[in-house]
Image: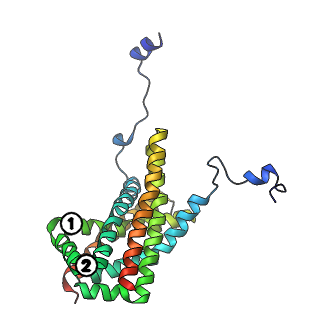
Amino acid sequence: MTGYRTPRAKVEGLGAAHSGTAHFWQQRVTAIALIPLAIWFGWAAMHLVGAPYDMATAFLRRPVNAVLMILFIFAALYHMTLGVQVVIEDYIEQEGGKLLLLMLNRFFAWIVGAACLFAMFKIAL
Amino acid sequence: MAEQAKAAHPRPLSPHLQIYRWPVTMATSIVHRATGLALAVGTLLLAWWLIALATGPDAYATFQMVAATKLGELVLFGFIWSLAFHLLNGMRHLAWDMGYGFAIPTANKTGVLVIALSVLVAIGIFMLGYGALP
């Protein structure tokens, strides 16, 4: 099933970075998703910053809040990874160091994401 | 030879960052990047808060204790302000992506607006969060 696309069709629109506008577009999509999610998070943080333990867990146990928090974490970490990647690509010239930092950038997001998700499941379920 | 020529007639250098008087748009641009990086570090605070809540009242009490110190309050205020600024300035970027607001006077005005609003929002959230609200 691989033979039917012409070589030109395979590379069209991908540009010098070989990934087309995927990075740019994903950055915008997560940015738009984060507008309502970050507003919700600010509102939630305002209520919870000094809250006692029972109140904070009760808040996060409500399904709407639990789902919104998970969505916020996912969108924020996705957006963060894309943004930090650009900063690394802009400022780090040495190829090996750049590669290492780009990897650590991905690892950081996965580790923080897994920790937050596990915590949310433990709190909410 | 080339070296001597260089010494006698230094080539003109293009001015760099420290030469320019900082326009608002330049400040908001670099602050957008700085707040983005700060928020990336701030995800560790969010993770700590959630893990403390998942672990139990004792772990949560430790978090609360650290958050209530002067340094803790400063860090939390910085986090909230960074979020407010990055959110508001991000909307400005999305407007640019759609082709709006590029005129220099407009960009300057929205830049000042974003700075002012972000400070107001951060102070508002912080005051309500720590004080007046039940």
In the depicted structure, whether residue A83 falls above or below residue B117: above
Q: Chain of mark 1?
A: B
Q: Quadrant of residue B5?
A: top left
In the depicted structure, whether residue B8 falls above or below residue A118: above
Residue B88 can be seen in this image: no
* Residue A29 image label: none
Real-space CA distance between mark 1 and mark 2, rounded to the nearest whole angstrom = 13 Å
Residue B18 can be seen in this image: yes
Q: Is residue B60 left or right of residue A41?
A: left
Q: Position of residue B51 (x, y in %)?
A: 31, 73
Helix, strand or loop for disc 1: helix
Q: Chain of mark 2?
A: A
Q: Evaluate whether label 1 is on the same chain as label 2.
A: no
Q: Position of residue A19 (x, y in %)?
A: 63, 54
* Residue B74 image label: 1
Look at 23% across and 83% down and name the residue there. Answer: A51
Q: Quadrant of residue A49?
A: bottom left
B26 or B67: nearer the eye?
B67
**Residue kind at label 1, given as amino acid type:** Leu
Q: Assign the C terminus of chain A to one quadrant of the image.
A: bottom left
Please give the residue where the numbered disc 2 appears in the rendered image. Answer: A49
Using a 10 Å C-alpha cutoff, classify the residue at mark 1 as few (fewer than 14 neighbours), some (14 to 19) or many (20 or more). few
A90 or A100: nearer the eye?
A100
Look at 64% across and 50% down and name the residue there. Answer: A18
